[in-house]
Image (cartoon, helix red, strand yellow):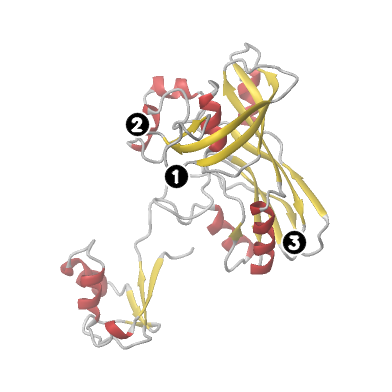
Amino acid sequence: MMERKNSVLIQPQQAGQQLLDFVSQRFTYRSREEWQAELAANRFFLNDTEAQGNAVLAQGDRLVYLMDALVEPPVDSTYTVLHEDDDLLVINKPAPLPCHPGGRFFAHTLWALLKENHGLAEPRLINRLDRETSGIVLVAKNKDAARLCQEQFIQHRVAKVYLVVVEGDFPNTVVPMEATGWLGPDPDSAIRKKMRFYPTQNEAPPGGVESSTEFRRLSGSRNTTLSLVEARPHTGRCHQIRASLLHVGFPVVGDKLYGVDEQLFLRFKEGCLSATDHALLRIPRQALHAASLRLSHPTSGRNLEFTAPLPPALQGLLEGR
């Protein structure tokens, strides 16, 4: 099992300090007494040797702190490998599973699982999916492959298709619905990270970014209260599919932030979702799935296309299961 640890390289201005003085002054989220207890528990190493609080630091010393193990929320770790070669690893990620460590998650992440299961010293996830979004994640095994893949994303040479189950009877039109506008912070939301879709630049707040997504109805549910929609993003903005669908009146099923009521997100963060809340959400995750990815191989240049089928939980929504 991987350990969580912090590593600090001692700079010239920090040399000459005692270790306990240094950590107490620099890392103030704990008291001096608490840091003394961590030292007594042998959680500090100085140049790979157990450290004492009265050790005098020298320039170039490496100080490592072994952090407490996290009690991490459960996730679905049953990812599948769609493709692997010397440069790339292509994963079908389940939900819920975070891509990267953050907050309460470290070992329960795709990044950690790839390190453990595939021997990758530093997995380079080229496209990130939210914890509650399933589907294709592209992983580069080396710096050159990562750079060349990232260039394709930046230059909009990668074709991405998402499948999403939305609330309501989405219009079945010959011409796909275009949601082209701007994304920026939502001033009416109690949640700082929530974005809003603005049809024009004049409506968007300063710092807003262009956003464009094409939506097409694929099918409806048995009782027509839900629709399966194909989303083709032409820009790669955070939350753009979810925010755009909320704007056009078809929120993503199970979405706590951009769904039928953002208060669900606040109650979820507090761990107090009610039975009524769960019924409104329909499923524990948001019904968004990265279904297809097309790009050029970073080394050979050959065309690659990967697909991941709609997960059973989302298929069950449409079939009324």
Mark 2 secondary-structure assignment: helix
The numbered disc on residue 152 is: none
Amino acid on which disc 2 is placed: Arg
Direction from residue 74 to residue 116 in the image, left or right = right
Is residue 253 visible in this depiction of the protein?
Answer: no
Quarter in which the C terminus is drawn: top right
In the rendered image, the vertical position of residue 191 relative to residue 260, given as above or below: below
Residue 215 placed where, x, y %? 66, 28
Relative to residue 279, is residue 101 depicted above or below? Answer: below
Residue neighbourhood size for the residue with mark 1, other residues' Cα within 10 Å, grouped as few (<14), some (14–19), many (≥20) = few
Residues 289 and 106: in front is 289
Q: Nearer the viewer, mark 2 or mark 1?
A: 1
The reply to whether the C-beta atoms of the residues labelled 3 and 2 are less than 8 Å apart is no
To which quarter of the image does residue 160 belong? top right
Please tell me which residue is depicted at 73% across the width and 22% down the height of the picture.
175
Residue most toward the top?
223
- Are discs 3 and 1 less than 8 Å apart at CB? no
- Pointer 1 residue: 207
3 vs 1, front mark: 1
Residue in the image at 64% along x and 68% along y: 143
Identify residue for label 3: 298
Measured along the vertical axis of the image, is residue 189 above or below residue 117? Answer: above
Residue denoted by label 2: 267
The x and y percentages for residue 180 are: 60, 32
Q: Nearer the viewer, residue 47 or 246?
A: 246
CA gap between label 3 and label 1 equals 33 Å
